[in-house]
Amino acid sequence: MTLNSHHGAQATASDPFGERSRRHVALCKQIMGGCFRFESASAALLDLVDAAYAGLPSHHLPPAAPEFRIELRLLPRRASPPAAEPPPVQMQSGAGLLCGVMDASNYVVLAPAQRQALVVASEDMLDRPYHLRYELIEFAVFTLATRGLGLVPLHGACVGRHGRGILLLGASGSGKSTVALHSLLQGLDFLAEDAVFVQPESLLATGVANYVHVQADALRFVDDAEIHRWISQAPIIRRRSGVEKFEADLRQSPGRLAAAPLQLTGAVFVSSQPADDPEILLSPIPEGEVAARLAAGQPYAVGQPGWHRFEQQLTRQGVHQLRRGRHPRAAVDALLQLLD
């Protein structure tokens, strides 16, 4: 059966989009320790899912992986031309449901207790695959995994080696993506660049290593011609903040993706400030200040059930500040000191 065999379904008064008469096809992906079953009558939506999650390492977290179900439904293109940028997602919750709504034709409804979600998108959004994937599909995946697996969701990156990992935290623009990229280029295992999910008790970290987002000015530190071409020829995405970045597919990179969840051995707050001494980039953060620093940068994660245990465990491992050196390679050398 091919994914293109679903078109041509007839709409009826009771089923205006012909959904019931179309055959749904399922794609199953092992993502962040869970088994995700994506079902849709739309070949285009399933192709987008496959492009996002195919070829990734199959991470497993103890205990056995639960199954999650996400239905994707495509609505007809709207009569009026869409705005230059989709409206931001607005959150609502109640009656055991979570909703993320862009507009009447683009939204997500999640039932975490049932491990199920419905993603609805209009055909217009197929022209904006970044927003559709990142703000609707990934929102469903990440939320179900967080709730169903008891993970703490973090805005950050993670790299490591030999099964050990370092969590990279910091404000947008601090340089986390650049440090993560050069870690990959220098042989470290790449776990995730934008979102990391941690078991609070074990400090096992997982994520989705599909893309790395790099600003154009970071290319000046990339000397290898093949790597420069890999990034510079990647699609350009525009963040809600207005910042534009290359979205380079990590599965086409020469580096290693973390084959399994990484055991966190600590964290660093990446700073955009240059080091006073370019030979000393790392400085420990006093234990008494770690909780406030973590909470300030992770407003969503603070409300999750496992936050306090995660905070305690990570503080015991040690948290540092990482200032900029002469070249991002120096930052990777500093990270290796924490991984040895």
Image (tube, rainbow, N blue to C red):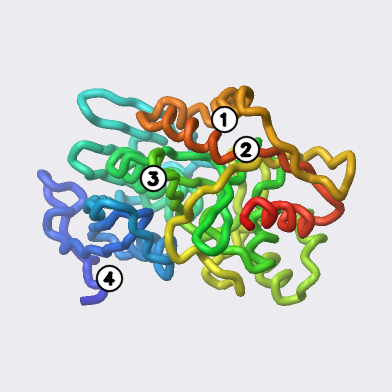
Amino acid type assigned to the residue bearing label 1 in the image: Leu
Residue 231: x percent and y percent?
67, 65
Q: Foreground residue, 179 or 2? A: 179
Residue hosting label 2 = 319
Q: Badge 1: few (under 14), some or many (20 or more) residues near its Cα, within 10 Å?
A: many
Q: Are marks 4 and 1 in contact (CB under 8 Å)?
A: no
The residues tagged by marks 2 and 3 sit, at their Cα atoms, a distance apart of 25 Å
Of badges 1 and 2, nearer the viewer stands: 2
Q: Foreground residue, 291 or 216? A: 291
Residue hosting label 4 = 3
SS class, disc 1: helix
Residue 220: x percent and y percent?
82, 60
Residue at left offset 26%, top offset 51%? 63
Residue 37: x percent and y percent?
24, 57
User: Which mark sits nearer the N-terminus, 1 or 2?
Assistant: 1
SS class, disc 4: helix
Q: Badge 3: few (under 14), some or many (20 or more) residues near its Cα, within 10 Å?
A: many
Q: Which mark is residue 294?
A: 1
Amino acid type assigned to the residue bearing label 3 in the image: Phe
On the rendered structure, is 114 left or right of 200? left
